[in-house]
Image (cartoon, rainbow, N blue to C red):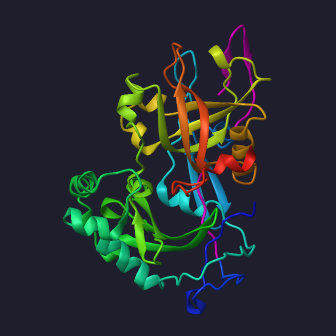
């Protein structure tokens, strides 16, 4: 699978005809413990720990951006934490390769993309939300409530930054970043414009809202056994409880901006496990690599009946980003 790209040269934007390679820049998914195990302590370095020095470290020179990875040792378990920002998530994975996109959909210009996003986020009612958003499994009324609660209508054009174009498993996307209050990128969000079957560009609501089904509160309160979640993942090495056998499982650290609101700071790193050589393991190996250690993905995770409520089995990999294509990503690896 070729890496996804961003088109940077907007002066040469044009309709994408069959077989034409667009002029792509890059978009990425920022995708991001000596551990005490049953009877032993393992000291295996993971991306979450590799960039930590005395609590803070700077991962620099990743295409002119700095990704700050904060870590904190706490308690007997010595959990680490990693709270990535949306902007970093959008710009950490970048290459210069060209990706061939098979499509005849005309892409919006940078100015048009920003206007589409701004117009959609100011949508005041169910009808306009249905017209301007891609709603996969969220009722329009619920989307309206979210926009009102997050005060999306108060955004101005100065809050928006166009990041470029991407192709996720054949799904075209235009990517825009929204700075948070007072230009704070840590509280910002990514917005993904996708074309519908008629070629009309709409905001993917679930990716923008970072939704989970059911929501994180229900899952963390142990009232739900499985959930479809949007998370950052990176390879990790915490093997314990039902996942103690390292030869049987692959371990990934997981963080979520939405889950982090509900968890103490020292517990914001969760753990997901997939069986070795399963379609899910093969899918995540394709996405997460030493060159791209922390990535956005959409997963189905299953709760385990163990004392640690932050350990989950990864049962599906729906997408290698937060926009979910029609065909689940892990079906490529059956």
Q: Is residue 240 visible?
A: no
The secondary structure that most of the magenta stretch takes on is: loop
Q: Residue at x 48, y 85 (%)?
A: 109
Picture quadrant of residue 53:
top right
Q: Residue at x 56, y 92 (%)?
A: 11
Frontmost residue, 100 versus 245: 100
Q: Residue at x 31, y 70 (%)?
A: 131
Image quarter in which the N terminus is found = bottom right
**What segment is highlighted magenta in the picture?**
25-46
> 74 left or right of 126?
right
In the rendered view, tell whether residue 221 sits above or below residue 166: above
> 246 left or right of 303?
right
Could you tell me residue 234's position as x and y percent?
A: 64, 42
Image quarter in which the C terminus is found = top right
Q: Residue at x 61, y 44 (%)?
A: 317
Would you say residue 10 sits in the magenta stretch?
no
Q: Is residue 119 visible?
A: yes
């Amino acid at each position: 699978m070729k890496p996804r790209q961003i088109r940077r040269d907007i002066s040469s934007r044009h309709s994408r005809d069959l077989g034409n390679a667009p002029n792509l820049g890059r978009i990425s998914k920022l995708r991001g413990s000596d551990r005490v195990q049953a009877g032993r302590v393992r000291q295996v370095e993971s991306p979450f720990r590799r960039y930590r020095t005395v609590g803070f470290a700077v991962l620099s020179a990743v295409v002119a951006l700095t990704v700050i990875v904060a870590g904190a040792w706490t308690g007997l378990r010595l959990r680490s934490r990693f709270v990535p920002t949306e902007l970093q998530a959008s710009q950490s994975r970048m290459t210069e390769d060209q990706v061939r996109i098979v499509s005849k959909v005309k892409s919006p210009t940078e100015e048009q993309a920003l206007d589409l996003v701004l117009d959609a986020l100011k949508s005041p009612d169910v009808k306009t939300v249905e017209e301007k958003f891609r709603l996969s499994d969220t009722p329009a009324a619920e989307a309206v409530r979210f926009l009102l609660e997050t005060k999306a209508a108060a955004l101005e054009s100065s809050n928006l930054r166009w990041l470029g174009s991407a192709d996720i498993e054949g799904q075209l996307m235009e990517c825009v970043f929204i700075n948070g209050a007072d230009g704070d990128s840590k509280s910002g969000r990514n917005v993904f414009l996708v074309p519908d079957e008629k070629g009309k560009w709409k905001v993917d609501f679930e990716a923008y809202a970072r939704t989970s089904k059911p929501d994180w509160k229900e899952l963390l309160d142990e009232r739900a056994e499985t959930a479809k979640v949007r998370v950052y993942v990176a390879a990790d090495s915490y093997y314990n409880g039902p996942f103690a056998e390292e030869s049987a499982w692959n371990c990934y650290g997981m963080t979520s901006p939405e889950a982090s609101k509900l968890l103490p700071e020292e517990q914001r790193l969760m753990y997901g496990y997939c069986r070795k050589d399963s379609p899910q393991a093969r899918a995540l190996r394709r996405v997460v690599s030493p060159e791209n250690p922390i990535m956005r993905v959409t997963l189905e995770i299953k709760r385990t009946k163990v004392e640690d409520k932050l350990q989950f089995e990864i049962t599906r990999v729906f997408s290698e980003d937060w926009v979910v294509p029609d065909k689940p990503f892990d079906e490529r690896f059956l």
